[in-house]
Image (cartoon, helix red, strand yellow):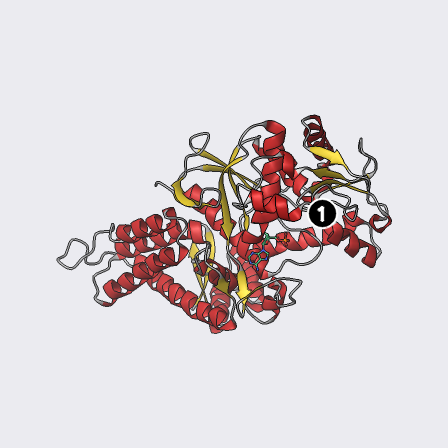
Amino acid sequence: MDLSFYNSLTRRVEPLRPLVPGTVRMYTCGPTVYNYAHIGNFRAYMFEDLLRRTLEYAGLAVTHVMNLTDVDDKTIRGSRAAGVPLRDYTATYKKAFFEDLDTLGIERATVYPAATDHVPEMIALIGKLFEKGYAYQAPDKSVYFSVAKDPDYGKLAHLDRSGMRASVRISNDEYAKDDVGDFALWKAWDEADGDVKWDSPWGPGRPGWHIECSAMSAKYLGETFDIHTGGIDNLFPHHENEIAQAECATGKPFVKLWMHCAHLRVDGEKMSKSAGNFYTLRDLLAKGYTGREIRYVLLGGHYRQPLNFAFDALAASRTALSRIDEFTVRMEALAATAGGPVGSPDGQAPSWPDKHLESFASALADDLNSPLAFAAVFALVNEGNRLAQAGSLDAAGAAAALAALAKMDAVLGVLARPAAAIPAEVQALLDERAAVRRAKNWAESDRLRDAIAALGWTVKDTKDGPRLSKS
Ligand code: AMP
Ligand code: ZN
């Protein structure tokens, strides 16, 4: 499976050529843990989940690092307003973030380094930039990166440097920085920071946001790695600044492939905390939608196209998912039957789903085309239903459909039918039945099976124990 992705740096779709064959090292800008993430943020994490699962589907071993920004203006402001220490304040939202990832079926990254655990690494990196002449301390005691010293600055955002320098040069002392394009590497402590500060060679303060990603990616992935991702709003200035810091400090290329997802919008506008047009995952769960339905909506659009959030789309996802679930139930029933028309003139070879798996893989290999990948899923469902209707699908053919769905689901994580929750009443009867069976009281066991059946559930005794399903 040859993968190609759009590279924001070159603005072209390029074949993926990992630096170490068979492996991919990937870094993602994670959440600022000052509040619950909204589903616009989760669009970005969902795209990264799809990317990561696609890489794994193609047989690559992925090391995925996602940082947690647990110190910045917003986290400090929030913790002071709440009157709790920064660490306790951010711990609440870190926990919520991981719960939300689970609700959405987003797989865990390999490591989630937190900024506050890596301040020495950031200080060391700033020190290197000083040594090489890229950093300076301003009269306000903060340390800045001098954009004018880096001839490559602007290569990701394709900035016109000549125009930029002429227009932004600041000649008076209104700004502490030499140039408005310069960005903080180290922010000198001030009163608004309260007790949040670290010692450094430049005085007490805290790291700037950009330096954390350059320092932590180098620590966990090395100075040069394969893929860096984020939402499109991270591209400038954040990612541009990450490149400047890393490449000026090491003299080596930072990242080969830059991938960015487009925004989730509401009525044509970016969903954001500041615009107030956002829903958290919890808001939507409270309205009765499931993580699976929200996942389906977020995966449904191509990651480089803006996606409009609407409740109609959530309703449509419910219909689409029940179509898939009905298909699964039908195939499970067929797969459990013995024999069938295999080898007969209208029988299907068990390889019949292969063409759908091929279209599925080639859609994803072509810059993560998830809408086309879902089209392959529905082509499988439609053909399977047609064959079943015509009576030309035997147990092996149905089992092949289930196997193909499971393969697709390793990437999509949304196709598997959720297990129905077992009501407490049924569970109690089931437990009681297990006890009477241990005592070999078969008559009571049968009575309890009938009582369970009267509640709409079927118990089958298998060699692995009782199996419960909805009648
Ligand atoms: P933040 O916590 O604001 O740094 O954002 C975390 C991630 O969510 C970043 O990758 C952002 O680019 C991304 N993001 C923020 N808003 C949206 C949106 N409306 N649609 C897609 N991604 C977003
Ligand atoms: Zn970052």
In the rendered image, residue 465, in percent from the top left (x then y), is placed at: 47, 53
Question: Is residue 70 positioned above or below 81 on the image?
Answer: above
Image-quadrant location for residue 145? top right
- Asked if one can make out residue 158 in the rendered structure from this viewpoint, the answer is yes
Of helix, strand and loop, which one carries label 1?
loop
Location of mark 1 (residue)? 70
Q: Is residue 265 left or right of residue 351?
A: right
The answer to which of 301 and 345 lies nearer the viewer is 301
Identify the amino acid type marked 1: Asp
In the rendered image, residue 421, in percent from the top left (x then y), is placed at: 53, 64
Q: Residue at x 24, y 58 (%)?
A: 394
The answer to which of 382 and 123 lies nearer the viewer is 123
Q: Is residue 195 left or right of residue 65?
A: right
Q: Residue at x 43, y 37 (%)?
A: 60
Q: Is residue 394 left or right of residue 365?
A: left
The answer to which of 452 and 14 lies nearer the viewer is 14
Q: Residue at x 38, y 52 (%)?
A: 408
Question: Is residue 328 positioned above or below 47 on the image?
Answer: below
**Badge 1 density bin: few <14, some 14–19, many ≥20, Cα 10 Å:** many
Most distant residue in the left direction: 345
The answer to which of 393 and 3 lies nearer the viewer is 3
Question: Is residue 202 positioned above or below 231 on the image?
Answer: above
Q: For the N terminus, give its image quadrant.
A: top left
Q: For the C terminus, give its image quadrant.
A: bottom left
Q: Residue at x 37, y 54 (%)?
A: 405
Q: Quadrant of ligand 1?
A: bottom right
